[in-house]
Image (cartoon, rainbow, N blue to C red):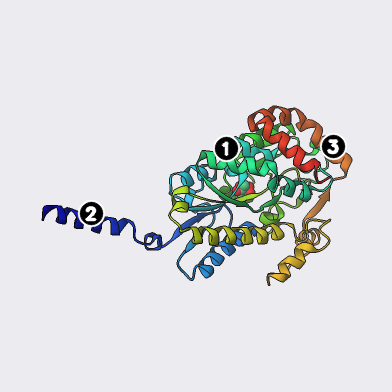
Amino acid sequence: MKKVMVLMLVAVCLSVFVSPASAAYKDEYKLDIVPSLSTGWGMGAQYFADLVKERSEGKINIKVYPNSQLTTGKQTNAFMLLRNGTIDFACQSTINYSPQIPELNLFALPFFIAGQPDRYKALDAITNGKAGKLVAKAIEDKGGKFLCFGENGFRELTNAKKEIHSPEDLQGLKMRVVGSPLFLDTFKALGSNPIAMPWSDTMSALQQGVIDGQENPINIIYPNKVYDYNKYITNWHYMGDPTMFVVNPKVWESFTPEDQELILKAAKDAAAYQIALARVGIDENDGGKNLEYLKSIGKAPEITNWNAELERVGMVVTNLTPEETQKFVELTKTLVDSWRKTIGEELVKAAEEDMAAVK
Ligand code: X2X
């Protein structure tokens, strides 16, 4: 009799644990992003959440928390919070995870990708190539489930004081950068006065004149109306800034294989959208393919020529000549060499090979 009772108890316990995984799904999964929902980054993240909800028929509900709400403004702590489960999902910039995952500094090496004949082809070669696999592995080794790369965009320079054509023009300017050491090194090497600051404080710092300028992709600059305080933009494309769709590994394991597949597919679709948004009207060599793609998914953008639009809202747009760019490259060469070691020779070499293969 006692044995039967024990067996029955075991059966009851098991039924609780072995019940369909979906029963254990959370009511809401929190997804972390740094900027607002009106940026290309934010729109891509929201599209991901929408696709997952729609395709899972409401079973998986991801909520996008913009403006670094989940990290209370401390965007460079974001990976730790994903790892410890405070954050379930993220669409994050490699820059913000780089303090914990040094390999991610690869993308921020100044002029490493921009120095290639076609910077977009070069970036794709890395994210889809050997280097991209090594980066994904570095994230997984540190405790994040990697899904795919999206895109924030190539980062450009804005300021309130003057047109920047050369490092001399940057001398002494107070430039806001992300709190990641490579950015401080780069902006010091160029002769400016870099100030590390979260994005959430940047617009008010620009407004108050605490800083003269900042660097970000046009996709962040425009929706935040940086042009209200910074009249000048220099398109120097000095680093490519991919985003990464990632999940807390325990959360990932809690999904059925079918739902994992659904989520991965949605992340890839959302990433394709985010990448096209980061490039349309900016990539001068895309032959119209980004616009075509956005039209094909019913998401044609309003603005298809960004330089013209930035001028329309009052900015002075400076496009550097190759000779002008070269001066910035020369001043950052030594730091690129020293950062190669921090990032890892194997990874940097893999990226160079990936890029060389598409030249
Ligand atoms: O802080 C920034 O500059 C931003 C919004 O681009 C990132 O999160 C890397």
Q: CA distance from mark 1 to mark 3?
A: 29 Å
Identify the residue under disc 2: 10
Q: Quadrant of residue 310?
A: bottom right
Left or right of residue 273: residue 254:
left
Residue 326 visible here: yes
Of callouts 3 and 2, the N-terminal one: 2
Q: Nearer the viewer, mark 1 or mark 2?
A: 2
Q: Which residue is mark 1?
A: 101
Q: Dot 2 lies on which element?
A: helix
Three-letter amino acid code of the residue under disc 3: Gln
Question: Of the residues shown, which amino acid type is indicated by label 1?
Answer: Ile
Real-space Cα distance between discs 1 and 2?
44 Å
Instruction: Name the residue rendered at 56%, 42% in the picture.
Output: 139
Res 22 label: none
Location of residue 252 in the rendering, given as x and y in whole percent from the top left corner: 47, 53
Under mark 2, the amino acid is: Val
Considering depth in this image, is 351 or 6 the residue closer to the camera?
6
Residue 233 placement, left or right of 56:
right
- Callout 2 environment at 10 Å: few (<14), some (14 to 19), or many (20+)? few
Question: Which of labels 1 and 3 is toward the front?
Answer: 1
Q: Are marks 1 and 2 in contact (CB under 8 Å)?
A: no
Q: Is residue 58 above or below residue 280?
A: below
Residue bearing mark 3: 326
Residue projecting furthest to the left: 1
Image height of 97 relative to 287, above or below: above
Q: Residue at x 50, y 42 (%)?
A: 143
Mark 1 vs mark 3: which is more N-terminal?
A: 1
**Disc 3 element:** helix
